[in-house]
Amino acid sequence: MAHVEESVVIAAPIGDVFDLIADYRHALSWMEGFSRFEILPGPSSGVGARVRAAGTLLGFSLETELEIVEFERPTRLVSRTAGPIRSLTAWILRETESGTQVTFTGEYHLPLALRFAGDYAFEQLVAGQIRRSLENLKQLFRPGAPNPQWC
């Protein structure tokens, strides 16, 4: 099993940051490694909402379905996937003196084809994508940036 955990502090109110993370319509504006997010039939937000996501990893094109399994606005969003890479990922937010600390954690069960590269290599690759994603998210809230709710 591979584990990834990354954090950043964003100078913005916790509710605004959570709302952007939870709104998959804006995910391509800040998430690295993905080329498509499509909301599937059913609830459009909260527990039970499902999204089909596509991207590339280690040169492989991957498509997976994420399902929201926990939704506690504005502090916690957890999703699970059951595709080729099974995962349980969480976005955990908490208020700080300088804004909002955003922590991403992910537990990944790799298919045989990716196990050959090793959990450590996978962790490093995904951690790099998450660090870039968190930095992109932070930039959306920098002073003078367009309001991320309308990106």
Image (cartoon, grey):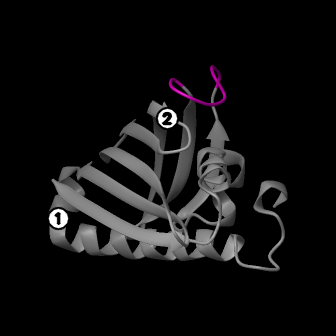
Residue drawn at (51%, 26%) of the image: 47
| Distance from the alpha carbon under mark 1 to that under mark 2 | 30 Å
Up the image or down, 18 lies above or below 2; here it is above
Q: Main secondary structure of the magenta part?
A: loop
Callout 1, which amino acid? Asp
Residue 85 is labelled as none
Q: Residue at x 80, y 76 (%)?
A: 145
109 left or right of 17? left
Res. 117 in view: no
The residue identified by callout 1 is 119
Quarter of the image for residue 41 reads top right
Q: State the residue position of label 2.
A: 72
Residue 47 counted in the magenta span = yes
Q: Position of residue 76 (x, y in %)?
A: 45, 43
Q: Are the residues flagged by discs 1 and 2 in contact, CB closer than 8 Å?
A: no
What residue type is disc 2 on?
Answer: Glu
User: Which of the pair 77/84 is nearer the observer?
Assistant: 77
Of badges 1 and 2, nearer the viewer stands 2
The first of marks 1 and 2 along the sequence is: 2
Where residue 18 sits: x, y (%)?
59, 50
Relative to 82, say whether 63 is above or below.
below
Residue that sits furthest to the front in the current view: 97
Q: Which residues are magenta?
A: 41-48
Residue 3's spot in the image, x, y percent?
22, 59
The residue positioned farthest toward the top in the image shown: 42
Task: Tell me if residue 20 is in the magenta stretch.
Answer: no
Which image quadrant for residue 121? bottom left
10 Å neighbourhood of mark 2: few (<14), some, or many (≥20)?
few
| Residue shown at the point (54%, 52%) measured from the top left | 54
Q: Is 116 on the left or on the right of 5, as rendered?
A: left
